[in-house]
Image (cartoon, grey):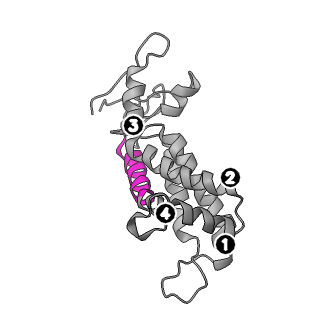
Amino acid sequence: MSTTTPGVRHPGGTDDIYGRGRAHAVEPGGSLFQRIIGTDARLAPAIARLSLGLVMLPHALQKTTGWFGGNGFGATYGGFTKMGIPGPLAFLAIVAELGGALLLISGLLTRLGALAIIGVMLGAVALVHVPHGFFMNWAGKQAGEGFEYHLLAIALGLVCLLEGGGRVSIDRALARRRPRGGVSPAVAEE
């Protein structure tokens, strides 16, 4: 990482409280694609991205393939529609959960993957979990599950949406290769 002089303002701000410059970050601006994939080499967004993606993937596979004790696509879709969720929205939720998880794990189009997961979680809270309260059904005494898990997933999704994929993401590799204004973005030591 590069070091900077404390108290001196650097273009793009700083990465941390120690004032290390963000010269390696892809600055906001440019094309829509550049803004979607823009990220820097920080570890925290990568941890949020991988944590959310790896937790969501088994849930998505339960719904799509029946793995991990799930019901598979047909039964999940049927269950969603019996709960009053319109068919197209049920289909979109199932596909968005799987697609979002895969995008997050790979770090490809991280912000879109995060947006998909946030949407699925907001829909789940609003349409299914609010009547059961905040807490999960640990003791088996509630009629259903609360929404505490969903809030954590939304929070991790917001980190990914705001910060991008971080270190070891396809987005970062793409952003480092795409010239902006004819000049490739500066890359700091990792």
Secondary structure beneath dot 2 equals helix
Q: Which residue is mark 2?
A: 88
Q: Is residue 144 above or below residue 66?
A: below
**Residue 26 appears left or right of 130:** left
Region of the chain picked out in magenta, as a range: 42-57
- Say if residue 4 shows up in the picture: yes
- Residue type of the residue flagged with mark 2: Pro
- Secondary structure mostly seen in the magenta stretch: helix
Q: State the residue lying farthest toward the top.
A: 182
Query: Does residue 27 show up magenta in the picture?
Result: no
Asked if the residue under mark 1 is in contact with the one under mark 3, i.e. CB atoms within 8 Å, the reply is no
Q: Residue at x 58, y 53 (%)?
A: 118
Front: mark 1 or 4: 4
Q: Going from the N terminus, do you reach mark 1 or mark 4 first?
A: 4
Q: Is residue 48 magenta?
A: yes
Q: Is residue 179 above or below residue 132?
A: above
Q: Quadrant location of residue 134?
A: bottom right
Disc 3 versus disc 1: nearer the observer: 1
Percent of width and height locating residue 106: 38, 42
For mark 3, what is the residue? 19
Between disc 1 and disc 2, whose residue precedes? 2
Query: Residue tagged by mark 1?
Result: 130
Disc 4 marks which residue?
72
Q: Quadrant of the C terminus?
A: top left
CA distance for labels 3 and 2 = 48 Å
- Looking at the image, tell me whether mark 4 or mark 2 is earlier in sequence order: 4
Instruction: Name the residue at 34% across, 25% down.
Output: 187
Res. 172 image quadrant = top left
Mark 1 residue crowding within 10 angstroms, few (<14) / some (14–19) / many (20+):
some
In 3D space, how far apart are the residues under numbered discs 4 and 2 (Cα atoms)? 17 Å
Q: Amino acid at mark 4?
A: Gly
